[in-house]
Image: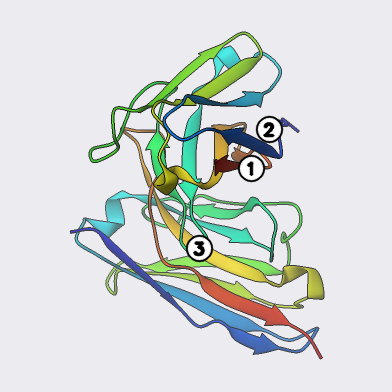
Amino acid sequence: EVQLVGSGGGLVQPGGSLRLSCAASGFDFSSYWMHWVRQAPGKGLLWVSRINGDGTTITYADSVKGRFTISRDNAKNTLYLQMNSLRAEDTAVYYCAREDSAVVTLDYWDQGTLVTVSS
Amino acid sequence: SYELTQPLSVSVALGQTARITCGGNNIGYKNVHWFQQKPGQAPVLVIYRDTNRPSGVPERFSGSNSGNTATLTISRAQAGDEADYYCQVWDSHVVFGGGTKLTVL
């Protein structure tokens, strides 16, 4: 059974840093692109970042470029999102999601991790 | 950047058919995917590549895509279908529509 379990969220002050993790199981993690998507309170879904199976191809949304870093450890079946220089507008639930090439979209999502940026 | 336009809300009577649209420039040339999100839960894929249902999604859910509009159709709407629905395409990266709140009356 495919499972994604996110962790690492919490309350952080503006300008601070936080690292999210997403533990994967039930599939060959290293063979899949992985994504981060966020959702501000009461708002819609917003794509954040994407990384390929071996970590060599990465893209970011303009709103987080230069501040966020996506990475993965295939030995640990874990995806990461390092978030620096956090702003109030980064407050959101962050989801990790698997991209399946057969359906050409995000077929499995974790439960979401809340990040609150506030003083 | 590519933009997707969805109505903020759609209402449907119990047992009737709901249609949720997703507008975009020549969206008919793109693969459109639809997600359902219930309050406090993660999004769930209900339609992929315009018309395909993942395993476990009821046949009541169907999709179409042509011209500048893609449509998610929910037949025989049930109370459990109340949720936010998001369309999604690829345009150098993942793009979501703004979401539509479906209310079943």
Q: Amino acid at mark 2?
A: Gln
On the same chain: label 2 and label 3? Answer: no
Q: Residues within 10 Å of mark 1 (few under 14, many from 20)?
A: many
Q: Secondary structure at mark 1?
A: loop
Residue B91 or residue A39, whichever sits in front: A39
- Which of the 4 image quarters holds residue B70? top right
Badge 3 is on which residue? Answer: A95
Q: How many marks?
A: 3
* Rendered residue at 49%/55% (across/down): B38
User: Do callouts 1 and 2 mark residues in contact (Cβ within 8 Å)?
Assistant: yes
User: Do callouts 1 and 3 mark residues in contact (Cβ within 8 Å)?
Assistant: no
Circle nearer the N terminus (1, 2): 2
Residue B6 is tagged as: 2
Q: How far apart are labels 2 and 3 at the CA level?
A: 22 Å
Q: How far apart are labels 1 and 3 at the CA level?
A: 17 Å
- Viewer-nearest of discs 2 and 3: 2
Q: Residues within 10 Å of mark 2 (few under 14, many from 20)?
A: many
Residue A11 or residue B18, whichever sits in front: B18
x and y, in percent, of residue A19 in the image: 55, 80
Image quarter of the N terminus of chain A: bottom left
Badge 1 is on which residue? Answer: B99
x and y, in percent, of residue B8 in the image: 71, 39
Q: Amino acid at mark 3?
A: Tyr
